[in-house]
Amino acid sequence: MTSTPATPENATPDQNAAAGGAVNELWGGRFSRGPSEIMERINVSIGFDKKLWAQDIAGSKAHAAMLAAQGIITQDDADAILTGLDQVAEEIRDGRFVFKTEHEDIHMNVESRLKELIGEPAGRLHTARSRNDQVATDFKLWVRGALQRLDGDMKALQAALIEQAERHVDTIMPGFTHLQTAQPVTFGHHLLAYVEMLGRDRARARDAIARLNECPLGSAALAGTPYPIDRAATAAALGFDRPTANSLDAVSDRDFALDYLATASICAMHLSRLAEEIVLWCTTQFRFIRLSDAFTSGSSIMPQKKNPDAAELVRAKCGRVIGALSGLLVVMKGLPLAYSKDMQEDKEPVFEADDTLALCLAATTGMIQDMTPDPAAMRRAVEAGFPTATDLADWLVRRLGLPFREAHHVTGRIVRLAEERACGLSDVPLDVMRGVDARITEEVYAVLSLEASVASRTSFGGTAPERVRAAVAAARERFL
Ligand code: ARG
């Protein structure tokens, strides 16, 4: 009988314990053997937190310099540490660094390599800090960078939208409520609505940066440290506004990651709404826009098809971003103070959401630049829906002094007559209109055209082309 070799999948707990590797050199004193293979597998985070390498090295450099300035370690040791950390950074940048799972995470991978490179002084770097304040600092730095990048990507999409909007300040399309034709609007006005949404998303990113910008470093494991550290100095060196005020909060706070994910989720939701409109606009029923071959794909069976796959995927990928937000909220919601290992599960959702959103923003910007609007198709669509009925009612109020409710009623009857005659409102003969209300005059036709309708909506924030032209200029000032 041959025995199956023990793999983590089929091993008994005993076999797993036996399969454990060497004692961890960073805390070996208390331990007589290494972790079981299954323990190592559930515990390691280097596979994903190596993304934090630059932030980890920056944090360690600030910490080492501060320790020397405060006389906690010698300047010689600090110099050796700083040179060694630069060397580690270079190895990682050049792809020469070997990330080891036995060193669990990015913090211990960097420190172990530092020890190999410079020997004894490496052991002094961890004075007056813990991986708990270290990881909170690293991750905050990463999220801050991600929010700044996100802001730039959102700005690029705003620029693309504003450019298309400018070309279509007087292109008339149906404006919808309940997805039923409501009133004519301009395509430029419609696109600028998304510029406003992205403006709020960018403001949320800026708020999140301002809120997260307090440095956890020096909070140590949870309680602070007896060493005479200078937290203001490390905070300033890392571009934070100030040190965090409470050590327990500092090591157990992941609000900044949640702020990132909330901001990202709302932005992804906006992109998903725009993507949904792009999908609709591309249908043979709407035909409001065309996407080029660059942003569509064909069907393997139906030769006539050009599918807006990119838009559909932007619409769908929003789910991942929202999923990341709810996932991390659930991880955090039951944790007692201070740090728990649960919090290691904070990074993957943020990294995944960040990749997803960056891709969605790039694809959306690409589609907005790529699309060719079809003003004739928009006009056909808008003409079919009696979109100037409100204008007729307003005319009855303004010219004939009818109460709005009565004007609404009169207009409703004229719409019904137009429907019966299968014509637009402006094609209903005057005597037919007069049959409904004898006071109506020839003058009414002036307000029934689409152009007159949009041109009349000059209130601030309205769809009149002159307003939209001013809104385009204002959006450039405000956002670009
Ligand atoms: N890899 C850990 C994390 O991401 C670092 C902090 C570990 N701290 C600890 N006490 N085990 O959360």
Image (spheres, rainbow, N blue to C red):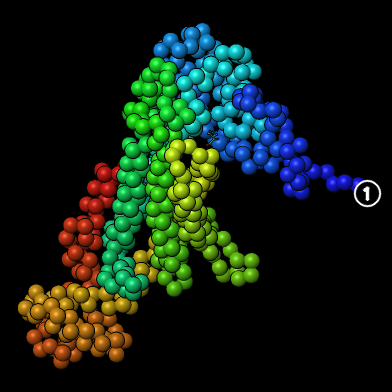
- Most extreme residue toward the right is 1
x then y, percent, for residue 449: 22, 73
> Does residue 295 appear in the picture of this structure?
yes
Left or right: residue 66 versus residue 56 is left
**Callout 1 amino acid:** Met
Residue at screen point 9% across, 79% down: 403
Image height of 428 relative to 378, above or below? below
- The one nearer the camera, 147 or 3, is 3
Q: Position of residue 107 (x, y in %)?
A: 55, 28
Q: Nearer the viewer, residue 113 or 153?
A: 113
Q: Is residue 416 left or right of residue 409?
A: right
**Residue drawn 41% across and 34% down?**
248
Q: Residue furthest bottom?
A: 435
- Residue occupying image coordinates x 36% and y 69%: 378
Q: Residues within 10 Å of mark 1 (few under 14, many from 20)?
A: few
Pointer 1: what residue?
A: 1
Residue 255, above or below 281: above
Determine the image quadrant of residue 368.
bottom left
Image position, residue 468 (x, y; %): 24, 56
